[in-house]
Amino acid sequence: MPAENFSSRSGSGAEGEYSEGSEAPPRFFEQLCGRFKINEGQQEVFQEFSRAMRQCSLAFFLVSASNIILTISQTRTQILHEPVTVLSGVTIGNFAFWADSILVAVLLYYGANSFKRVTEVMCDNQLPYIFQGLSRLSMVFTQFGVAALAVGVVHILEAASRHPPMTKVAASLFFAIAGIRSAALWWIMSDESSIEGGGVPEMLAKLRRGDESGSPRWERFAMRLVVGHLLAYNIPGLDKEGRQRGEHKQDQGSNGNGASSEGYDFTDGETQMMRICIDAMHTAGLAFIVQGISTMLLGIANLLTGYNAGGVSMTYNGFSKAVTAALLFKASASFDRAVTASSCNMAALLSAIGPEGLTKLWHQLTVFAWTVAQIFMPILNKSPLANFTASKFGSLFGQGLVFLQNAASGLA
């Protein structure tokens, strides 16, 4: 397509707009996006965002490396003769955990480089690079979800192989979750709720407005449990103040290139790109919940079969995945507020990915990953803390679970 066909929309048809060392963005994003040049303060936000993603990538890579070293060191003294064992004491679950951590590290590094390019290009229009980064970030979260579900299935199967009664526990747990969600849906749709049976549109509008008046805490939790994943979508007529006008205010307080942080409102196409990213974040969060439950069940199965070291590590890893899901939902909520704000502009996007948005998410995930890596370090096998946790708390936790399982069997 000739440049003049879309230069009026994106202003990118000018010869020499991109410097010699700059990589021109794909024409799809040039056609989709308008013109915007970030200032120094906005550039620092993207730099910190990219830096936080790279640090998180390194932390997840070290998680995988330390777990590999720990597993190999353990197999020298303990060979597991079980169906899930595939190589000298290394189980299918071990391979799945390694692959998951390495894949997360690679995807994070890939996404970080996309946003790093935003701050490196020397041109008068950096908006196409920003939305190219958002598009790749959506792909990263989508792959997170796929990998988490795959690892969750592997861990459930290994837990059932190690401790067959765990199959009933897993089935009962997921059935209970489905029952709780159905009960929440029934209450929200009933006339006795605070929205008086207003349905999905009224629930979404109330959640987006942050209206907590007249709703008890448990009911707000029920709303998010039922329709929280629908926050990424925009129902026509739901929120008139949040309607995207598809206009660019490039002449209000800008330098002629749309450089004002408040003077650029995103178009419908640009807003839809952000909605896709929010949807991918929600999907990844749900997948991490499934993986967290599955991994904790594998840890419980390890404890019940006397494999305390693996039980403690898998239980903690499952808990960390559940926390990761909670952090993802929290970050996606800030992103959703930016998209549905009365003025969806660059300032709102910077707030969504800034220190209180996705950047904070990467910092928190880095802390969790480093914690897991330290727990998996082989030197901890000889530390008093690790031995006490594995031998004392692990066995007590396993005994408690056996008691609960027997009680549940008696009730059944």
Image (cartoon, helix red, strand yellow):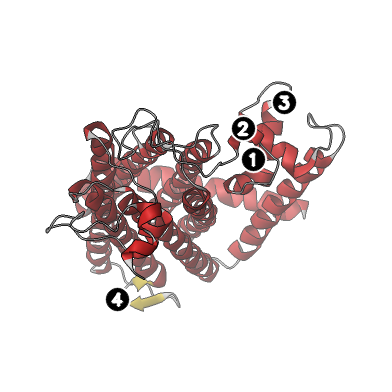
Tell me: 6 left or right of 74.
Answer: right
Tell me: 364 left or right of 295.
Answer: left
* Residue 47 in the image: above or below residue 62: above
Query: Which mark sits nearer the N-terminus, 2 or 3?
Result: 3
Q: Nearer the viewer, mark 2 or mark 1?
A: 2
Pick the residue in front: 255 or 27.
Answer: 255
Q: State yes or no: discs 4 and 3 in contact (Cβ < 8 Å).
A: no
Q: Residue at x 35, y 70 (%)?
A: 95
- Amino acid type at image mark 2: Glu
Q: Nearer the viewer, mark 4 or mark 2?
A: 2
Query: Which mark sits nearer the N-terminus, 4 or 2?
Result: 4
* Residue 59 in the image: above or below residue 342: below
- Amino acid type at image mark 1: Arg
List the residue tagged with mark 1. 224
Pick the residue in front: 2 or 217.
Answer: 2
Q: Nearer the viewer, mark 4 or mark 3?
A: 3
Label 2 secondary element: helix
Which image quarter: residue 5? Answer: bottom left
List the residue tagged with mark 2. 241
Q: Position of residue 93 (x, y in %)?
A: 41, 67
Query: Which mark sits nearer the N-terminus, 2 or 1?
Result: 1
Q: Position of residue 375 (x, y in %)?
A: 29, 47
Q: State yes or no: discs 4 and 2 in contact (Cβ < 8 Å).
A: no
Label 4 secondary element: loop
